[in-house]
């Protein structure tokens, strides 16, 4: 099996300026994703390539000494606020395929701003696809704390009603709902080449622990993540494993 891991990080961010360049508990934020990939490579026998798609010169400079990373220049049309991330991932795949002369079996995108993941989560993603080969996309979710059939409401025409009308009197009666935590996506290569929207295909999910819903899109998110991480790195062996595997800082150019 051949796998392309993609990491996408554009220079502009409306939620938290420069978030892809931030230092998180002593290391660049991208180091946590790279450590997870390196551990996966050590624990599996798959052929793996890693590609960073970015328009940020600073991010490119930060990891230029890191071995084995393909740098894919982000196209201008993929650098806007409305650009589809799936189109960025597809372009990364097509360029990496050409550069490496490898027709990858799977493309796995790991979000740069989601350091709360474990190597087991990556293996679970692949196992789901292996169990159900007809799936076009497999992505990570967490249990939702709210349910649109029971305790989520909307306002329309000055009236309040359930998001999805129902007569359920308990949450247990309502359909199971998940939150997409945007941490990990596995794409079937054929589906990725022909589509712009994941729900055009057959989707599967893997369940991560509920605290994994956090990602960094604001200053408040970043502060919460730093606070929670101190506990998780002590209590969760999978999180500790990645933290302890982050390579020497000499591989990163950090101002």
Image (tube, helix red, strand yellow):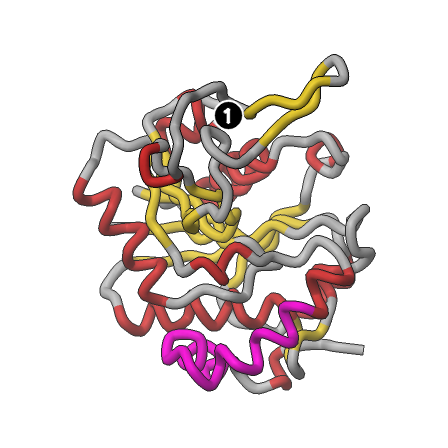
The correct choice, above or below, for 237 with respect to 108 in the image is below
Q: Give left or right: position of 142 versus 120.
A: right
Give x and y (percent) for residue 37: 42, 65
Answer whether residue 103 is visible to the viewer in this image: no
Q: Give left or right: position of 179 versus 62.
A: left
Residue name at image x 35 percent, y 51 percent:
207
Residue name at image x 32 percent, y 34 percent:
173
Taking depth in this image into account, of 5 and 215 the one nearest to the observer is 215
Q: Give left or right: position of 217 versus 238.
A: right
Give x and y (percent) for residue 138: 35, 41
User: Residue farthest to the left?
Assistant: 131
Give x and y (percent) for residue 184: 45, 50
Give x and y (percent) for residue 229: 56, 76
Residue name at image x 37 percent, y 24 percent:
201
Residue name at image x 54 percent, y 70 percent:
32
Answer whether residue 118 is visible to the viewer in this image: yes
Judged from the image, the secondary structure of the residue bearing numbered disc 1 is loop
Q: Which residue is mark 1?
A: 197
Residues in magenta, as a range = 224-245
Taking depth in this image into account, of 160 and 252 the one nearest to the observer is 160
Taking depth in this image into account, of 161 and 20 the one nearest to the observer is 161
Taking depth in this image into account, of 198 and 169 the one nearest to the observer is 169
């Amino acid at each position: 099996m051949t796998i392309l891991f993609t990491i996408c990080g554009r220079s502009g961010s409306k939620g938290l300026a420069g978030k892809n360049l931030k230092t998180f508990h002593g290391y660049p934020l991208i180091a946590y994703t790279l450590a997870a990939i390196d551990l996966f490579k050590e624990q599996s026998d798959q052929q793996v390539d890693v590609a960073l798609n970015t328009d940020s010169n600073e991010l490119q400079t930060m990891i230029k000494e890191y071995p084995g990373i393909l740098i894919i220049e982000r196209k201008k049309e993929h650098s806007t606020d409305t650009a589809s991330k799936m189109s960025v991932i597809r372009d990364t795949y097509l360029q990496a395929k050409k550069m490496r002369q490898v027709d990858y079996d799977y493309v796995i995108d790991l979000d740069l701003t989601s350091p709360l993941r474990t190597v087991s989560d990556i293996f679970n993603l692949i196992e789901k696809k292996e169990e159900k080969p007809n799936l076009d996309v497999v992505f990570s979710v967490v249990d939702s704390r709210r349910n649109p059939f029971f305790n989520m409401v909307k306002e329309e025409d000055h009236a309040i009603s359930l998001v999805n009308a129902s007569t359920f009197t308990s949450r247990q009666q309502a359909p199971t709902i998940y939150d997409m935590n945007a941490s990990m996506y596995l794409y079937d290569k054929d589906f990725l080449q022909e589509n712009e929207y994941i729900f055009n295909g057959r989707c599967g999910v893997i369940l991560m622990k509920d605290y994994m819903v956090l990602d960094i899109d604001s200053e408040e998110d970043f502060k919460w993540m730093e606070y929670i991480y101190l506990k998780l790195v002590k209590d969760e062996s999978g999180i500790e494993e990645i933290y302890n595997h982050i390579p020497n800082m000499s591989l990163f150019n950090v101002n």
